[in-house]
Image (spheres, rainbow, N blue to C red):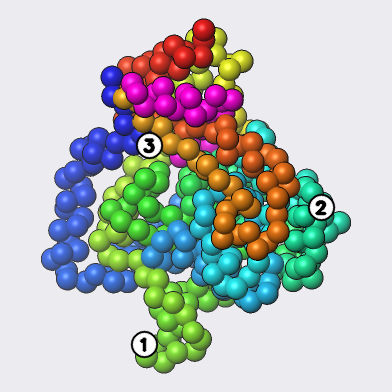
Amino acid sequence: MKVPFLDLKAQYATIRDELRSAVDEVLESQRFILGPQVAALEQDVARFCHVPYAVGVASGTDALLLSLKALGVGQGDGVVTVPFTFFATAGAIANLGARPIFVDSEDASFNMDPKALELLLEQGCSAGPSSRRAHLQSRATVKAVIVVQLFGQCADMDAVLRIAGRHSIPVVEDSCQAIGARFRDKPAGSMGALGCFSFFPSKNLGGAGDGGMVVSGDKDLSDRVRLLRTHGAQPQYFHKIVGFNSRLDEIQAAILRVKLRHLERWSKARQKIAGEYKRKFQAADLLDRIALPEVLPNRVHVFHQFVIRCQRRDELRSFLSERGIETEIYYPVPLHEQECFRYLGYQPSDFPQAHAASRQALALPIYPELTGEQIDCIVSTIAELLAG
């Protein structure tokens, strides 16, 4: 049986008429940039995240970039984040002339280890000698922490906010993979100074192209992001600051408004599928050969990805591919080992959890339309290789 990693056609089939009607409405209006659909989506997302402000931007990457810029991050500043994440997290830092400063992840969640953050900020050291040197070069200029809510589950936000707060360092939530996730009943994106979302088509709430959103409880920061997204102009052609061209378009907003109405149902379907995976892997007696994703206390996990760990990851992926089952590796090279960040001076061994995850993590198919028969096929095929 062939099992695609993601099947957006299956999702589209369930909401085709709604989407076409929404897009037609925009086409009839002939308003395409920052119109009523964007304004309405901003209100919808703000309400969904329990915050007063939301600003639509061109992508999740831009959401991060504009959030850091709004906080005043610039040349020579340091921003703390994790090396096991999508490139955009650190890329946004570097593109402002700032310096990514890495701390390791937790084994159980792949998210930021608060103990590592505390050690970095309190003692000026991290996992190894080279990371200590890298941090000390920028120790006095740490301007922000970006905490990533990876794969659909929040980090320990109590600890991260407490530790950063002791040093008066603002926290930006990279919630690009976690819209709908919760920590102590607080929505992802609502807990830091600013929260960032991506609407890339593969996300739990995905558009028909790129798109992003910044949410916040801080009016001044939100106004700053809103100013930055339109070249710093207010009103048009009168530029207060040098900004960017980062505007969410009306067609994307209309599509996302339709999909947002279905998001909670889709999240519950993902959670149900994750539970089925767990039961079937247990029944196949595979839990001593693979590690399943954990739902940690006080979290609502929305399973943007279902990522297992396996010592024979590459062999398993090839085996599944040969049998028509698609998987993905998130992420094969942690950021501190990327060529473009070699200048930071880190060694692979500085962040052992990120290094190990990059060699063990394998994402299996998970989306609301995945069938029980497909899950059975995936589990039985994995058992065929590993159970012997």
Q: Which amino acid does label 2 sit on?
A: Pro
How many angstroms separate mark 3 from mark 1 (CA)?
39 Å
Q: Which residue lies furthest to the right in this view?
A: 123
Q: What residue type is labelled 1?
A: Gln
**Whether residue 158 is situated above or below residue 372 in the rendered picture:** below
Please state the total of marks drawn on the protein image.
Answer: 3
Please tell me which residue lies in front, 308 or 386: 386
Between disc 3 and disc 1, whose residue precedes? 1
Q: Tag 3's secondary structure? A: helix
Task: Locate residue 134, reporting x and y percent.
Answer: 75, 61
* Residue 312 forms part of the magenta stretch: yes
**Whether residue 19 is situated above or below residue 225 in the rendered picture:** above
Between disc 2 and disc 3, whose residue precedes? 2
Q: What stretch is highlighted in magenta?
A: 299-323
How many angstroms separate mark 2 from mark 3 (CA)?
45 Å
Q: Which residue does the image show at 13% across and 66% down from the upper left?
A: 28
**Split into 4 quadrants, where in the image is the N terminus?**
top left
Q: Residue tagged by mark 3?
A: 266
